[in-house]
Image (cartoon, rainbow, N blue to C red):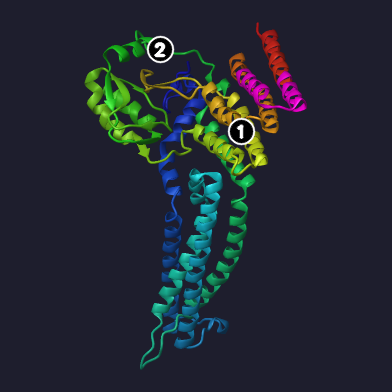
Amino acid sequence: MTLPTPPSSGAESDALVPRGKATRLEERLPSWRFEAARTTLWLVPTLFVVASVALFAATIAFDHHVYADRVTLPTWLAAGGADAGRQVLIAIAAAVITVVGVVFSITILALTLASQQFGPRMMRHFIRDVGSQVTLGVFVATFVYAVLALAAITSGPGAAFVPHLSITIAEGLSLVDVGVLIYFIHHIARMIQLPEVIASIARDLHQAIVSEFPLPASSQLEPLDDEGRPVAWLLDALERSGATVPASSSGYLQHVGYAQLIAIAAHNDAVIRLTHLPGHFVVEGHPLAEVWPRTAAPQVAAALDRAHALGPHRTLLQDPVFAIDQLVEIAIRALSPAVNDTFTALTCIDWLSAGLSELSQRSLTEGVYRDRERRIRLISSDPSYSRMVNRAIDKIRQCAAGMPAVLIRLLDGIRAVTKATVDARQRQVLARQGGMILSLAEATVRDANDLADVRLRHERLMASIAAMDEGAEAASP
């Protein structure tokens, strides 16, 4: 059992804490707010609008200096009279807002059609795309700048005020918009292609695995127990005399504030055991955590409301299983009779095998978190290796009945994962999946040659597992 602690500045703590777990805790703290802000279509455009207002304030101030004959502009910056300037700015504003409406209407239609093929959960993947957000921001910022410059033009009995520099900047922004429009069309056309979508989700899976699970080398220190309070004793105390903290609302658990919970537990000299992992659905009134001693339950309940983030959907933050489920969803949709796209399913299997290979090199253990005094304050469980492997393979295998190409690719993918495993228990999980695939093939594949190919792949998988087991036994002292 790995016993990580929250980050601290003391050298003694740094020597005792496995580095991977400490880094994992540090990465969790601010990221859920960033993820929530990233999955919006208003934040980046708002920042661009603010920037355009600031740019207009600077250029209009310069134009006022020109109007007062304090500064002289080059002759090529002259935009003609007030009427000519208005016509230019009106044309820019009208063209930009028209393009925004047309382009993003088409985009929403394309993404709607794509979500029907990829699954409704893929829409969040497209919404959080930075390229789309920046494109919308550039167009909206140009429109706002042109409208502000248009309002600054004045004409009357005296000399008319024409902001020549601001009009020139608006013309330059319109040229930038043309380049952004070309980029956006290319970007959307590429982004909705299945290989790009699958590869992007696979990258998210890799990042989630790296940030959530440490390498085994970072977990080799001997477990530490509180004096007189070993982990087993604390778990028994939680079962016998602990208080249950119910959930205050329903939703998917999107984020757990581990550092906040450790701090409130240390302040109340308590121990907290979390009953849900990020990605689990929490029902209002059902147990969310267990607290010992009972007297600390009210304070912990208040802390849980602040430290936990619940929402209507799952996110990749602290939940690598969600990325696995996304790839599996695309695969089983592709294998459905309505779509019948075997090659897409094979692509998903390839990326899933890459993710499971990375996962096989990581440490998936129960987490016991300490305060700065090295006292156990928080106990939570990480997803087990078998659970994540089963989530990646079970549904695809069940949908691949009678499809030797998919069954063969599953066996080849499992064999590739086997080469990345670090212990025999992982290989037992993979061998079990290989046996289930072979049983399915023998029951559903009718052609003898196809069945022979499946059996050959299974034999290679089992031979690879046996060779690695023998190698591990020979290397052990």
| Image coords of residue 304 (percent x, y) | 31, 31
Secondary structure mainly formed by the magenta segment: helix
Q: 112 or 448, which lies in front? A: 448
Question: x, y percentage for residue 165?
Answer: 49, 77
The residue sitting at 59% across, 38% down in the picture is: 331
Residue positioned 67% across, 32% down in the render: 403
Q: What's the CA distance linking mark 1 and mark 2?
A: 37 Å
Q: Along the polypeptide, which appears first: circle 1 or circle 2?
A: 2
- Most foreground residue, 427 or 304: 427
Disc number for residue 225: 2
Number of the front mark, 1 or 2: 1
Q: Residue furthest front?
A: 446
Q: Position of residue 341 (x, y in %)?
A: 64, 42
Q: Are marks 1 and 2 in contact (CB under 8 Å)?
A: no
Q: Is residue 81 left or right of residue 444?
A: left
**Foreground residue, 441 or 242?**
441
Q: Which residue is mark 1?
A: 352
Give the amino acid type for the residue marked by disc 2 in the picture: Asp
**Residue 463 in which image quadrant:** top right
**In which quadrant of the rendered image does the C terminus lie?**
top right
Left or right, 373 with respect to 55, comes to left
Please provide the residue range marked out in magenta. Answer: 431-459
Report the residue that reaches farthest toward the bottom: 157
Q: Residue at x 62, y 14 (%)?
A: 424
Instruction: Identify the secondary structure beneath mark 2.
Output: loop
Occupied quadrant, residue 161: bottom left
Indicate the secondary structure of the residue bearing disc 1.
Answer: helix
Q: Amino acid at mark 1?
A: Leu
201 part of magenta stretch: no
At 53% from the left and 64% from the top, the residue drawn is: 103
